[in-house]
Image (cartoon, rainbow, N blue to C red):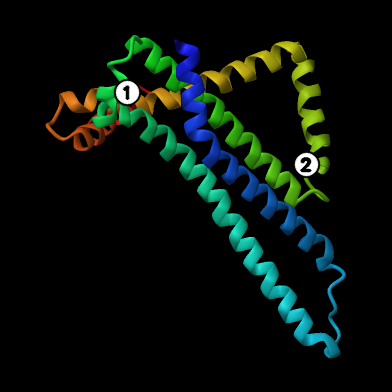
Amino acid sequence: MLGKLLKHEFRATARIFGLMYAGLLVLAGMNAAVLFFSGLAPVSMDAVFTSVLFDTISSLLVLSYMLMLLAVIILNFVIIVVRFYRLYGDEGYLWHTLPVSVDQHLISKLIVATIWSSASAAIVFISIGLVFIADWPFNEMGTITEATQQLKAFGIPNGFLLFTVSTYVFTALIARILSYFAPIAIGPNLTKSRLGGSVLAFVLISICRSIIE
């Protein structure tokens, strides 16, 4: 049954994530093309209009890319929260009539949220690399190599370093997602308003976590 939950969750979210990723990559490619041709743009007095038009288009593309980049980051968070929040709304009554345990509901939401969050991060970095393909990340490889060699000098093997960093990033991602889920699950027990209780629970949890840290 967990597999069916995952299948439904992916179907419900794949379209909007797919459109966001496609739009971000297209805008990144267009900005990369603009940056490539910017050095070839005419600058003579006879081509002032063309130069101004080129600069205007470049500015609009950069603005569109930045807005799309921000939209991917924000909507990734919003979709994850809304999909879990619906379990405690009117839609939740239908979900909880299924022969599925609460754990399976939680695990399915967590798995899908983790995968989409990882995909969003990857797409964001790919798009940035595409925009600055002439300069990044190739010119940073030397710095990464140097840092890796310094770590090896301290006796830290590459395999252990990769495993440690990957484990930390994966664990931090899951912890972040659960930090969104926990207030939503606790919220209805604090106030009559599900939304108000979720916000209150988030604030209380954030305060407690800050004190502990």
Element assignment for label 1: helix
Which mark, by number, is residue 182? 1
Q: How far is the residue under mark 1 from the one under mark 2?
A: 37 Å
User: Image check: 55 left or right of 149?
Assistant: left
Q: Residue at x 67, y 55 (%)?
A: 27
Q: Is residue 113 visible?
A: no
Query: How many badges with numbers are in the image?
Result: 2
Q: 208 or 187: which is nearer to us? A: 187
189 lies above or below 100: below
User: Image check: 84 left or right of 188?
Assistant: right
Residue under pointer 2: 137
Q: Is residue 25 visible?
A: yes
The N terminus, quarter of image: top left
The type of residue carrying mark 2 is Pro
The type of residue carrying mark 1 is Ala
Give percent across and percent down for residue 161: 70, 16
Near mark 1 (Cα within 10 A), the count class, few <14, some 14-19 or many ≥20, is some
In the image, which is nearer the foreground, mark 1 or mark 2? Answer: 1
Q: Residue at x 83, y 35 (%)?
A: 142
Which mark, by number, is residue 85? none
Hey, which quadrant is residue 124 in on the image?
top right
